Amino acid sequence: MNDFNLTKEQVFAYFTSDDGCCDYKPSLDAYIIYYNDITITNPKRMLWTIVHELGHILCKHNKINSITELDDDLYDFMEREANYFTSIFLAHPAILRELNIHSSYEIEVFCNLSTQAAKYRYASFKRFTTLRFLTGSDKLIIENFKDFIECKNEDYQEHLNFMSAFQGNFF
């Protein structure tokens, strides 16, 4: 922004997003993710934005953008797809199941999501748990995150033990 002598408003207008965007630079054969750290100061929101833009890259939305003019329906679809990617990336339901998640607050804490994102994820997670089965890829993800899951479950058990030590001992 400063290198090109642009105001914050000019940068936002150019990128058509207040949160972030991604761009492909053919000369570098590289993607660049831009995110707004001026008006967005919540680290959880920044993380969501960066992973959301990564979702656009991995879903190859740039190729769609370069082929066709986006109508509102296609744009909305790509945003939903990037949001879904982000929610799975940051809070995969199979991992949430192994963590014995019981509330959106627990998702917020365990997965470093904003309160709003954790509420959406928890609603989706409750639908996932009604299926009561894991796919092969779910099992592989659980295996890959086994150490993380065990560590978080141990931390949670210590927290419960700590809290129960104070129950009924105040008066």
Image: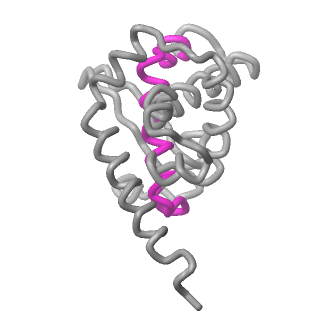
Residue 51 in the image: above or below residue 116: above
- For the question of whether residue 42 can be seen, the reply is yes
Residue 144's place in the image compared with 147, above or below, is above
Residue at 50 percent of width and 31 percent of height: 97
Report whether 162 appears left or right of 130: left
Q: Which residues are magenta?
A: 37-65
Instruction: Please give left or right for residue 121 compared with residue 20 in the image.
Output: right
Residue at figure coordinates x 66%, y 21% from the top left: 130
The image quadrant that residue 75 belongs to is: top right
Residue 87 location (% of width, % of height): 53, 33
Q: Residue 21 or 83: which is nearer the viewer?
A: 83
Query: Is residue 86 left or right of 25 when viewed as pictured?
Result: right
Which quarter of the figure has residue 146? top left
Q: Residue furthest right?
A: 72
Looking at the picture, how far across and down is residue 137, in whole percent?
40, 12
Q: How many marks?
A: 0
Main SS of residues in magenta: helix
Q: Considering depth in this image, is 38 or 116 the residue closer to the camera?
A: 116
What color scheme is it? one colour
Residue 22 visible in rendering: no
x then y, percent, for residue 148: 29, 40
**Quadrant of the rendering where the C terminus is positioned:** bottom right
Q: Magenta segment: does it hold 15? A: no
Residue 62 x %, y %: 48, 18
Q: Is residue 38 left or right of residue 127?
A: left
Q: What residue lies at 44% left-to-right and 39% top-to-bottom?
A: 99
Compared to residue 163, the image places residue 6 above or below, namely above
Task: Assess whether residue 54 is covered by the magenta stretch.
Answer: yes
User: The N terminus appears in which quarter of the rendering?
Assistant: bottom left
Q: For the point 63% across and 39% down, which residue is it?
A: 122
